[in-house]
Amino acid sequence: MATQTETREYEQAKARVEELRSLIAYHEHRYFVLDSPEISDAEFDALVQELRALEAKHPELITPDSPTQRVGGAPVETLGIVEHRVPLLSLANAFSEDDLRAWHRRVAAQIERDDFALVCEPKIDGLAVALVYEDGRLTTAATRGDGMRGENITQNVRTIRSVPARLKGSVPPRFEVRGEIYMTKSGFEKLNYERGEAGLPLFASPRNSAAGSVRQLDPKVTASRPLDIFLYQLGWMEGAEPPATHHEALEWIASLGFRVNPNIRRFETIDEVARFCAEWTEKRDSLDYEIDGIVVKVDSLAYQRQLGAVGREPRWAIAFKFPPTQATTKLLRIDVNVGRTGTLNPFAVLEPVKIAGATVQLATLHNEDDIRRKDIREGDTVIVQRAGDVIPQVVGPVLSKRTGGEKVFRMPRKCPACKTPVARAEGEAMYYCPNRQCPAQRFRLLEHFVGRGAMDIDGIGESLAAQLMRAGLVQDGADLYYLKDHRDELLGLERLGEKSVDNLLASIEASKRRPLAQVIFALGIRHVGGEVASILANHFGSIDALMDAETHDIDAIPGIGTKIAESVREFFTLEENRRIIDKLRAAGVNLREESGGAREGPLSGLTFVITGRLERFSRDAAEALVKRHGGAAASSVTKKTDYLVVGAEPGSKLAKAQQLGTTILDEAGFIALLRERHIELPA
DNA sequence: CCGCCTCGAGTTCT
DNA sequence: CTCGAGGCGG
């Protein structure tokens, strides 16, 4: 009978649907929580597709916790209100180590002992949520709200892939876990970039972005946002004995398949806690999510009960807050610099503001498109931060502080230095001053010529370079080699006595023996940096051979394409540039490759990236050492990187390497590796 | 033609 | 450190 066949098919489908759901749940856990997938993305997608097809055929098998429902249900009119069974408290803040130790003393006094354990957790800058599970299924997710009542965001939280919709094994019939929903920095950047392209208003920060995403009425919007979650506390539970300590509770939460932050540590003393806080103050930027402090909690739940709360703040926990690396200040105006290649570089002139220990007054703004994308206007109140704790950066305007008197920036039509009309090449982001005689360009070119990696002449900085040009003593780098005939004029310059003139002339003299690659680099040919200069020097062996080369001769070299070849060719066809070469030659500057450097060595085939500050040698010296022994030194971490060598205060490269699973060496490890391969270290 | 990998260029502050 | 752009393989 037909019905019998149908029933059998239905039973089979039902069984397969169940199986697929548990398979998918398992692999999602491997991928999103443990970060170690067992199957490829394509294989995973195939499982989801199969489930989707079965559900389409048998809609009655669809349940709200099915992984296919993660893309989001129907939009709602408004988010409902949820009453928290146990209020979500806020935390007292500690702004210094003293505050932290004072808190510890108060706790010790109240429980009458000082040998209690503490748990430290990075304080994620996101959105606090409470998740309620009944019979192993997620039934309610709510925002913190005012601590007593929050908004119902269950539909939206179901779209976050690392939140288990159903728990495995035997679990208490009802319990609540608490955590923080956040957006990764990389996800935020990508999202904002896409919003900019689509002409949508930008989010100010990953935190804002996460909050906005979670409070969407349409879960499909939430599903499209790169959200994730860390759980950090057991709210309440029924029908089972709760653990005795906070860290055991965390272990239990992790064992259920929730994501728990891997950087949580348990300590016995406040000294260790203080050290932990200090460490993270330094390396907070190495994570791909924002943290604004460290939460310190008393581990024992019995002590926690004994300590209780004052008002809305528990006495058993405190938030150690990092000094802010972001601040708001006024953007006074946008000025424009001219680079050595003629590029016009806009930068922000800010009302001075202290950020992370330094007073920031200037910040680069890259180009006109970037300013427009971020909608930054002159007169705006802006958020400023120090990327990697160093380089100041304008994040964006504070729209609520707009008065209407702000001015939209427009790139000047004429070069600010020489008044030549500027041009913007088709499809390029930068404006150029096309005038090769532009004084600003010549000045930057001279600075480049004497700089490190180029002719490396000590004693010429910004001010002396400017004076030499203003006095008419130097027009280009080659003129430096004729300064010895103008001793008297040199002595007439500011802050230049007999002794400094001698030193200056000596270092100019010494620079005549730089290798060919550095001379080529010093010329400042567009698209020719240190790397390309080195390739050209190796290939041609002398300036003369390079000067006489045709475009196709240069183009044929691996690593060199048409753009570079044309740029080199154009440089040497210009009379003024050939004259510079003549002057260098007449002065006795080395214009040929001294000797072919040994390329093979014990590090052949290995690629190193060096980041942070090393103790034993400068980064340049370390890179030179690697290259001298056949290795390659790259500037950014990719799949091809074999070793990341990490010094003090590393930046974002460390996170990238951890993400890719690159082997990470500290300085001692690096030195050990060199010794192992019998490489002598410089004195 | 697209996406990945490298390199080039400009930059801050102490 | 950042972004943009050149080179090149798929």
Image: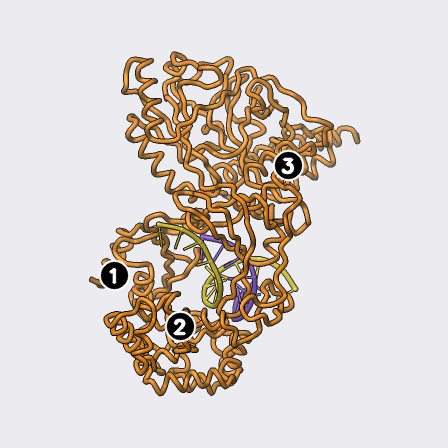
Chain colours: A orange, B yellow, C purple
The residue tagged with tag 3: helix, strand or loop? helix
Q: Amino acid at mark 3?
A: Thr
Question: Mark 1 or mark 3, which is nearer to you?
Answer: 3
Mark toward the start of the polypeptide (1 vs 3)? 3
- The chain containing the residue under callout 3 comes to A
Q: Amino acid at mark 2?
A: Phe
Residue with the mark numbered 3: A222
Q: Amino acid at mark 1?
A: Arg
Mark toward the start of the polypeptide (2 vs 3)? 3
Q: Which residue occupies the extreme left position in the image?
A: A683
Classed neighbour count for the residue bearing mark 1: other residues with Cα under 10 Å, few (<14), some (14–19), many (≥20): few
Q: Residue at x 36, y 18 (%)?
A: A300
Answer with the quarter of the image where residue A409 lies: bottom right
**Residue A534 in sight:** no
Residue with the mark numbered 1: A677
State the residue in front, A351 or A342: A351
Residue A37 lies, in percent from the top left, at 50, 43
Question: Mark 1 or mark 2, which is nearer to you?
Answer: 2
Up/down of A504 relative to A230, above or below: below
Tell me the distance, in whole angstroms, between the alpha carbons under discs 1 and 3.
Answer: 53 Å
Residue with the mark numbered 2: A449
Q: Which residue occupies the extreme right position in the image?
A: A2
The residue tagged with tag 2: helix, strand or loop? helix
- The chain containing the residue under callout 1 comes to A
Tell me the distance, in whole angstroms, between the alpha carbons under discs 1 and 2.
Answer: 36 Å
**Which part of the image, by quadrant, shows the N terminus of chain A?**
top right
Is residue A580 toward the left or the right of residue A11 in the image? left
Mark toward the start of the polypeptide (1 vs 2)? 2
